[in-house]
Image (cartoon, rainbow, N blue to C red):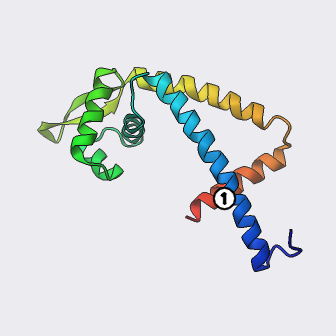
Amino acid sequence: MPDSPESDAARDVYALEIEQGVAVLYRASKARVKRLVEHLDPDMQTAGYLVLRYVMAHEPIRAGDVAAGLSMDKSAVSRQLTALRESGLIEAQPDPEDGRASLVVSSVKANERLDEFRVELKSDYRRMLASWDAADIEAFARLLNKFNESR
């Protein structure tokens, strides 16, 4: 490893290490999302999970706003919303501002299943960080946030 972390050569080495670390995190994250999707509904597609998470973050929301927010085709979002509704993970309610339109919200079932999964996830992270001291955990969280915000 080059002596000075400020040198271009050192930054290149660290950039490669970061890229490799991010790749490992990405694969682990994909596996975790797959487990979550199976927990929510074994027949759900990953796109359905993305739609559900967007709904949960922005509810109540119109279907067209989900499509725009995710940069997805309206028909694709409509198919995912239909599947989520049939699975009992979302519900439609009348839009108080426009009686012809409806808003989408997550169901109690969706929230309960996500809460169950978060408990499992928190347990996983506690196990992974059990040998770390508090200062390292704090530094990792802070630096990870800084890294993600720099995109």
Horizontal and vertical percent for residue 32? 58, 34
Residue 138 as seen in the image, left or right of residue 104: right
Q: Residue at x 41, y 40 (%)?
A: 50
- On the question of residue 62 being in view, the answer is no
Horizontal and vertical percent for residue 93? 23, 29
Amino acid tagged 1? Glu
Mark 1, other Cα within 10 Å: few <14 / some 14–19 / many ≥20: few
Residue 1 as seen in the image, left or right of residue 106: right
Q: Could you tell me which quadrant the C terminus lies in?
A: bottom right
Q: Could you tell me which quadrant the N terminus lies in?
A: bottom right
Horizontal and vertical percent for residue 29? 59, 40
Q: Residue at x 74, y 72 (%)?
A: 11
Residue 5: quadrant of the picture: bottom right
Q: Residue at x 18, y 37 (%)?
A: 96
Residue 40: quadrant of the picture: top left
Secondary element at tag 1 = helix
Residue 123: quadrant of the picture: top right
Q: How many marks do you count on the picture?
A: 1
73 or 130, nearer to the observer: 73
* Image vertical order of residue 41 relative to residue 97, above or below: above
Horizontal and vertical percent for residue 60? 31, 38
- On the question of residue 8 being in view, the answer is yes
Residue sitting at the far right = 3
Residue sitting at the far bottom = 7
* Image vertical order of residue 18 relative to residue 95, above or below: below
- The residue identified by callout 1 is 19
Q: Residue at x 70, y 63 (%)?
A: 16
